[in-house]
Image (spheres, rainbow, N blue to C red):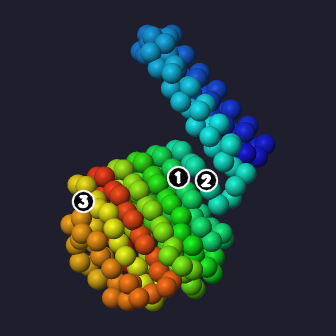
Amino acid sequence: MTRSHRHAAWGIILVVLGVILLLDAFRIFDFWWTFWKLWPLLLVWWGIRLIRRERRGDSAAAFEAFGDRTVNVTEETISQEGIFGDIRVTAASEVFRGGSVSNVFGDVLVDLDGVVRVEGEARLLVKCVFGDIRVRLPRGAEYTIEGKSSFGHTAAPDGQRLHGRAYASPGFDAAPDRIRLTVSCVFGDVDVMQ
């Protein structure tokens, strides 16, 4: 975080705290009762911050809480996790070897359209709770789709609804280089495109 962003963050915190204390002074909001009931949320926030700081050193792996993000991954694998925000991942590497993306309370978009080739059997796991999943596979790649969406649909590139069944492209079994896509979605739809 840059110095100007830190100053802005502290400014926002002071303004919010001032408004809350003012509401408490006029007995509109009981700050102290609420604080003593909800203070464990500070521990949750602190833990999330520590996890983010620990993972920040690896550009291929990231965890983000409370905010949408768009990531261009230049490595051959993808590893992204999030909560309370959308994740949009674009594979900017020529070669794709697999990875995982998981999110809670937000949509997931994984775009592999720019991938030139897949090496071996690239396994991609995409999980989402309370959000939709969209995966754009590389053109011409052989693939299989496994998994399902609870309380939503799972659709193959041809628009076919899978209803928990596995789906494979026509040349998947014979292809040495292919993508094995495993999806798991609760309260959302899964759409795979090519």
Residue at image point 62% right, 40% down: 51
Q: Where is mark 2, residue-wise?
A: 62
Q: Quadrant of the N terminus?
A: top right
Residue 180's image quarter? bottom left
Q: Position of residue 161 (x, y in %)?
A: 22, 72
Name the residue carrying label 3.
152
Q: Residue at x 37, y 63 (%)?
A: 183
The residue under label 1 is which amino acid type?
Glu
Which residue is nearer to you in this view: 118 or 107? 118
Q: Quadrant of residue 148?
A: bottom left
Question: Which disc, if any, is residue 90?
Answer: none
Image x and y of residue 36, in percent:
49, 12
Q: Which class describes the residues within 10 Å of circle 3: few (<14), some (14-19), or many (20+)?
A: some
Residues at circles 2 and 1 in contact by the CB criterion of under 8 Å? yes
Q: Quick one: label 3 or label 1, which is nearer the N terminus?
A: 1
In the image: residue 12, left or right of residue 127: right
What's the distance in space between the residues labelled 2 and 1, CA to CA? 6 Å
Q: Earlier in the sequence, mark 2 or mark 1?
A: 2
The correct choice, above or below, for 41 with respect to 136 in the image is above
Asked whether the beta carbons under mark 3 and mark 1 sit within 8 Å of each other, the answer is no
Which residue is under mark 1?
A: 81
Q: Nearer the viewer, residue 148 or 22?
A: 148
Alpha carbon distance from label 3 to label 1: 21 Å
Q: Residue 192: image x %, image y %?
A: 36, 73
Which corner quadrant holds the C terminus?
bottom left
Residue drawn 62% across and 37% down?
A: 49
Task: Bin the neighbour count of mark 1 within 10 Å (Cα to Cα): few under 14, some 14-19, many 20 and up.
Answer: some
Q: Dot 3: what SS?
A: loop
* Residue type at tag 3: Gly
